[in-house]
Image (cartoon, rainbow, N blue to C red):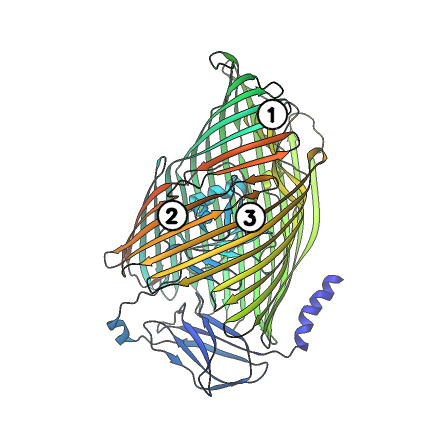
């Protein structure tokens, strides 16, 4: 009943509001193709005073809201075209003016006289998001998507590859506008298989509307892959070499053909070599103290691909198909030495050599069919059907050899092997619709998703070269989940205010079934729940240079599929990881106030409150072994201030600075009712300077700093920082591009942390190959005026974020 009342209010209230006017339009060229990034400027007819300015999006569309009644004229301009100027027109209160297909004419004099070198800013600050334009960054050269996220403003990546946005974990990763179903280590592996040469931009959205999935309580990071929207055919090849502790090689081929009737596109990328990371941790427990030194090496290759087509049935209707995925063949080697001491006497007890190796194969396949209708006047329909298959196998060999304190006599040797195949199938379908309604725009949509995960874990003890199945640790876990969702939102303008209201409903049905070789309790866990996620925003234009926006949203973070899996995955005899089938989702309410000055300087105050907060916690078992498990702990509060400012000092020197201060408070209990009450204030800084020395040669310097912070619930980190430098030179009439970058110049990115809970104190330090030299060369073949594949979304990406499996730090980085 409350829902019906709220929906009635959202729609009915719009009929009672006297709204200001709206102007919209689409800008095209002589071929009828969209012109992106054109300037649309509104002037008063009486004195030519500028009243409003916007930039067209990738589809050539612009929109101006909150305009008072009066007489105006509109100018549209873009480099290489003659400026369009409209006739004078009048706007009454609560009216709408639409300019359909404003055609810009090529200015031959301009083309002959100048060389067009317009480029997008490396960082764009907008009222609702921040965009990191990877394609234009020199220091992005040779990076994987995971490494790029470490460089993105306001983003941190912790020791377990969890992505933290503005001081809060629980970030949802989108790819081309759709949420990824992968999560945890499998998401990290996917991001490692994606090269910077595939990526156009990274979009950071801290307060999404109800149109987006409710998953991701910290916000959304959307990775936009490269697109091209020009007619003809072309291919772009990128080759790269990275030298860190080991050598690495990468290559990407992008191909595209487009005419008025069809667009065919394809991409293949490979990243191979060896990656290294290390972790040293000292554990102080009630009975034993252990001091561990471990070095992990991972080798590829990591492969990804994408092929698709768009058929333009007419100017309103488009039908598209996509097949994409990845296939990886990984080898992992771990050298781990554990020194064991008696906690009461501090006398040495023994030394454990727990070096291990494993082989993994990951084959991911995703298909999408898409239909889109757009009448070019605000009425759109978008329909997606998706299927995803994720097949992951991992076979491990784990010898455990105990030596006496002098490390010269073997006391005991235990050898184990394991086989852990995981099969995940995902099915989704969604429909989205937008249309003009009254003084604003109405959006509505529905989505259905069904996921099955089948996990088998066979654990063997090797005795006299014979593998004996351990029935106590071997089992099968099947998890099924169905989510049915619907949303409704409405956006309109009232004088100087722009208002958006939305509501999303999600019904979740899940069942997890554990089949063991021995009898156990709680074999099946079933859940059914219905949630509502309201969202809203109000923006106010103070004047031409100042604007305020207030946003509110309620969001959810569901556990990764593997966090629900009760298996015990042994890393060695003294450490393992286990799942928790009783994990509950966590819910976050957040509110943020943003002030924007001169379309560039952005300041945001943000507060969030999370209930049923969950996080991975290291603990000690009864036998003295250490383990990691994800638990519902209690509540988390985060209050923060973030300031972003892109600024051009001179014509040849442009900068971007992002600074944030966040205060975090975690409160609750972990197992055995041990309380935690942790408070931490964190400061982080990101800066990037670009120097355009000539039209063809540029330099780039960037860096970040993180003060002491908190990862998860109880992991307290020390400060770390990094500085990168790079250079770019355009060759072969600017069809070729050479980039050289040196990351982490002073090798200061490695981290240190501690955990202090009753029964276990840990000191940990670790790092990845952050210090690397990267060299890349790219070349464009064919017509450089070819338009690429449209930037369309698929329906399956939300579920990808929650798949977790094999992988680990270092692979593909």
Quarter of the view holding residue 647: bottom left
Q: Which residue is mark 1?
A: 625
Task: Compare marks 2 and 3 and give the one earlier in the sequence.
Answer: 3
Q: Position of residue 179 (x, y in %)?
A: 53, 52
Q: Which residue is mark 3?
A: 682
Please identify, in this view, whether the residue under mark 2 or under mark 1 is nearer the observer.
Answer: 2
Dot 2 falls on a residue whose secondary structure is strand
Camera-side residue of 485 and 543: 543
Q: Is residue 495 above or below residue 567?
A: below
Mark 3 residue crowding within 10 angstroms, few (<14) / some (14–19) / many (20+): some
CA gap between label 2 and label 1 equals 40 Å
Instruction: Tell me where residue 609 appears, x and y as whole percent.
Output: 66, 52
Query: Foreground residue, 381 or 502?
Result: 502
Count of number-bearing discs: 3
Q: Visible in this render: residue 788?
A: no
Could you say where residue 813 lies in the image, as x and y percent from the top left? 41, 41
Q: Tell me which residue sits at (63%, 20%) in the image.
A: 344
Give neighbour class at mark 1: few <14, some 14-19, many 20+ (Cα, 10 Å): some
- Looking at the rendering, in which quadrant would you find the N terminus? bottom right
Q: Is residue 125 left or right of residue 506?
A: left
Q: Earlier in the sequence, mark 2 or mark 1?
A: 1
Residue found at x 74% / y 66%: 5
Q: Is residue 50 visible?
A: yes
Front position in the image: 355 or 328:
355
Q: What residue did someone put label 2 on?
A: 724
Cα distance in 3D space between marks 2 and 3:
22 Å
Q: Nearer the viewer, residue 542 or 66?
A: 542
Question: Is residue 617 positioned above or below 293 on the image?
Answer: below
Left or right relative to 628: residue 148: left
Q: Where does residue 135 sit, x and y in percent of width and height?
A: 38, 55
């Amino acid at each position: 009943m409350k829902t019906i009342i709220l929906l009635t209010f959202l729609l009915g209230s719009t009929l009672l509001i006297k709204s200001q006017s709206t102007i919209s339009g689409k800008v095209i060229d002589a071929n009828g193709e969209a012109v992106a990034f054109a300037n649309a400027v509104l002037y008063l007819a009486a004195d030519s005073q500028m009243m409003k300015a916007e930039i067209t999006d990738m589809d050539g569309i612009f929109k101006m809201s909150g305009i008072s009644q009066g007489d105006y004229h509109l100018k549209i301009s873009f480099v290489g075209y003659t400026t369009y100027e409209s006739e004078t027109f009048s706007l009454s209160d609560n009216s709408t003016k639409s300019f359909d297909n404003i055609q810009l004419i090529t200015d031959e004099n301009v083309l002959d006289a100048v060389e067009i070198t317009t480029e997008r800013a490396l960082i764009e600050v907008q009222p609702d998001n921040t965009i990191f334009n990877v394609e234009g960054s020199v220091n992005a050269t040779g990076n994987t998507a995971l490494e790029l996220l470490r460089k993105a403003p306001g983003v941190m990546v912790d020791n377990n590859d969890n992505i933290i946005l503005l001081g809060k974990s629980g970030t949802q990763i989108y790819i081309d506008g759709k949420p990824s179903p992968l999560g945890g280590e499998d998401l990290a592996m996917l991001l490692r298989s994606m090269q910077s040469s595939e990526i156009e931009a990274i979009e950071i959205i801290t307060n999404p509307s109800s149109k987006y999935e409710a998953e991701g309580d910290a916000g959304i990071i959307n990775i936009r892959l490269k697109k091209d929207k020009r007619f003809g055919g072309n291919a772009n090849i990128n080759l790269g070499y990275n030298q860190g502790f080991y050598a690495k090689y990468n290559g990407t081929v992008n191909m595209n053909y487009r005419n008025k009737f069809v667009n065919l596109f394809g991409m293949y990328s490979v990243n191979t070599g060896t990656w290294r990371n290390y972790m040293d941790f000292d554990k102080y427990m009630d009975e034993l103290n252990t001091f561990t030194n471990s070095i992990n090496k991972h080798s590829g290759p990591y492969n990804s691909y994408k092929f698709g087509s768009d058929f333009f049935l007419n100017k309103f209707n488009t039908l598209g198909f996509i097949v994409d995925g990845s296939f990886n063949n990984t080898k992992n080697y771990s050298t781990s030495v554990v020194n064991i001491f008696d906690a009461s006497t501090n006398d040495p007890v023994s030394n454990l050599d727990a070096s291990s190796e494993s082989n993994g194969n990951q084959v991911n396949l995703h298909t999408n069919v898409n239909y889109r209708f757009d009448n070019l006047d605000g009425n759109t329909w978008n329909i997606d059907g998706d299927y995803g298959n994720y097949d992951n196998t991992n076979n491990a060999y784990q010898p455990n050899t105990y030596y006496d304190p002098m490390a010269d006599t073997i006391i005991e040797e235990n050898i184990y092997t394991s086989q852990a195949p995981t099969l995940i199938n995902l099915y989704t379908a969604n429909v989205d619709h937008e249309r003009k309604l009254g003084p604003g725009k109405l959006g509505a949509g529905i989505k259905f998703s069904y996921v099955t995960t089948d996990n088998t874990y066979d654990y063997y003890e090797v005795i006299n070269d014979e593998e004996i199945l351990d029935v106590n640790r071997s089992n099968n876990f099947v998890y099924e989940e169905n989510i049915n969702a619907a949303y409704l939102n409405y956006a309109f303008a009232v004088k100087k205010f722009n208002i958006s209201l939305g509501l999303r409903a999600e019904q979740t049905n899940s069942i997890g079934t554990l089949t063991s070789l021995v009898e156990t309790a709680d074999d099946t866990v079933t859940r059914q729940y219905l949630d509502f996620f309201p969202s809203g925003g109000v923006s106010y234009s103070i004047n031409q240079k100042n604007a305020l926006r207030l946003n509110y949203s309620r969001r959810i973070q569901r556990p990764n599929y593997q966090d629900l899996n009760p298996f015990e995955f042994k890393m060695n005899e003294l450490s393992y990881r286990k799942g928790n089938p009783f994990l509950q989702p966590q819910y976050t309410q957040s509110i943020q106030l943003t002030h924007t000055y001169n379309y560039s300087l952005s300041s945001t105050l943000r507060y969030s409150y999370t209930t049923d907060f969950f996080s991975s916690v290291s603990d000690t078992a009864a036998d003295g072994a250490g383990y990691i498990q994800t638990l519902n702990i209690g509540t988390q509060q985060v209050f923060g201030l973030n300031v972003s400012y892109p600024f051009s000092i001179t014509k040849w020197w442009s900068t971007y600075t992002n600074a944030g201060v966040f205060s975090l408070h975690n409160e609750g209990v972990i197992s055995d009712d041990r309380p935690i009450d942790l408070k931490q204030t964190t400061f982080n800084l990101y800066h990037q300077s670009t120097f355009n020395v000539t039209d063809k040669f540029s330099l780039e310097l960037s860096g970040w700093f993180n003060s002491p912070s908190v990862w998860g619930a109880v992991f307290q980190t020390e400060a770390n920082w990094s500085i990168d430098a790079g250079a770019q030179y355009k060759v072969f009439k600017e069809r070729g591009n050479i980039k050289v970058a040196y990351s982490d110049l002073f090798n200061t990115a490695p981290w240190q942390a501690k955990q202090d809970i009753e029964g276990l104190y840990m000191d940990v330090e670790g790092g990845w190959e952050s210090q690397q030299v990267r060299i890349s060369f790219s070349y464009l073949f064919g017509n450089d005026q070819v338009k690429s594949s449209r930037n369309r979304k698929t329906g399956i990406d939300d579920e990808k974020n929650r798949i977790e499996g094999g992988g680990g730090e270092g692979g593909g980085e």
